[in-house]
Image (cartoon, grey):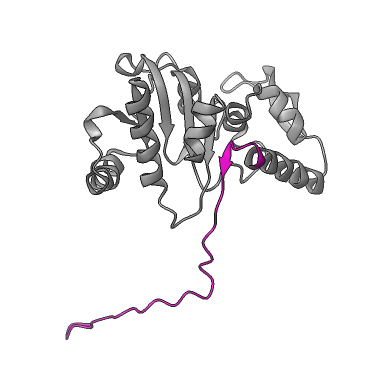
Amino acid sequence: DLALTSIKVKDYRGFLLADGTGFGKTRQLLAIADQYRKSTGEKVLILTENKTTIDQNFTNDAAAMGIDMKQFKTGTYGGFKDSKSGGVKPEFDQDWGMVLFDEAHNLKNYDSLQATAARRLKKKKVVYATATPMDRPSAGAFMWSDVMGQDYLTTLDKLGMRIMRETVFVKNKGKVTKEVPVLKEGVSPQQMIANIQSMRNAAIRGGRMLKRYYPFFGTTNDITVEMSDKD
């Protein structure tokens, strides 16, 4: 409900589902996708790490929830991008009403082909699902920029990151060098942590992010092991 309210009522572009293990992010993504599809009639794309996740996790949960998976287009991170052009393959080059990224930490490297292709997908709304949206300062900044409705450079600046230029040797070119942009931390580690917490809290207060934990510490599990004669 929070994601749909943020996206449809408040007209935010994106939502970050950052629940920890045990809160059923797959079912939450399915519910969001199903309600968005039914209420708008627009095309919905779900991207996951691999085909097994779609064929088993999503398909089984959808069946249990009474949701028809055929109403969505599905794909994998390795399958939707065009490695030659850096864009997306023709079948994914459409106008999507919503794109949902499962295990979105796969997109944290801004310059990777995967992340570049993800940014080039034509989409009105986007949902990122990952329990670790920003486990290091430079990771996931473009996801946060989508969620917060601000450009990438503004997000980096608020985090305390700086784009600097470094001179490096060109591979297989002997002593030939070139300048390349490099992300560096421009503030102390303590200030960086404070900046990340501030951005996270602003996202939560604004209804752009949901983050819940399950306290597994102290949980007791009964495990039965049967030994065969050969063991």
Q: Report which quarter residue 179 is drawn in.
A: top right
Q: Main secondary structure of the magenta part?
A: loop
Residue 226 in the magenta stretch? The answer is: yes
- Residue 181 or 201: which is nearer the viewer? 201
Q: Position of residue 178 (x, y in %)?
A: 68, 17
Q: Report which quarter residue 187 is drawn in.
A: top right
Quarter of the image with the C terminus is bottom left
Q: Position of residue 24 (x, y in %)?
A: 40, 51
7 left or right of 98 in image: right
Q: Which residues are magenta?
A: 205-231
Residue at x-position 80% and y-position 49%: 190
Q: Look at the picture and state if 205 lies above or below 116.
A: below
169 left or right of 52 in image: right
- Residue 206 or 177: which is nearer the viewer? 206
Q: Position of residue 21 (x, y in %)?
A: 46, 56
Q: Position of residue 4 (x, y in %)?
A: 47, 34
Residue at x-position 56% and y-position 22%: 172
Asked whether the viewer can see residue 161, the reply is no
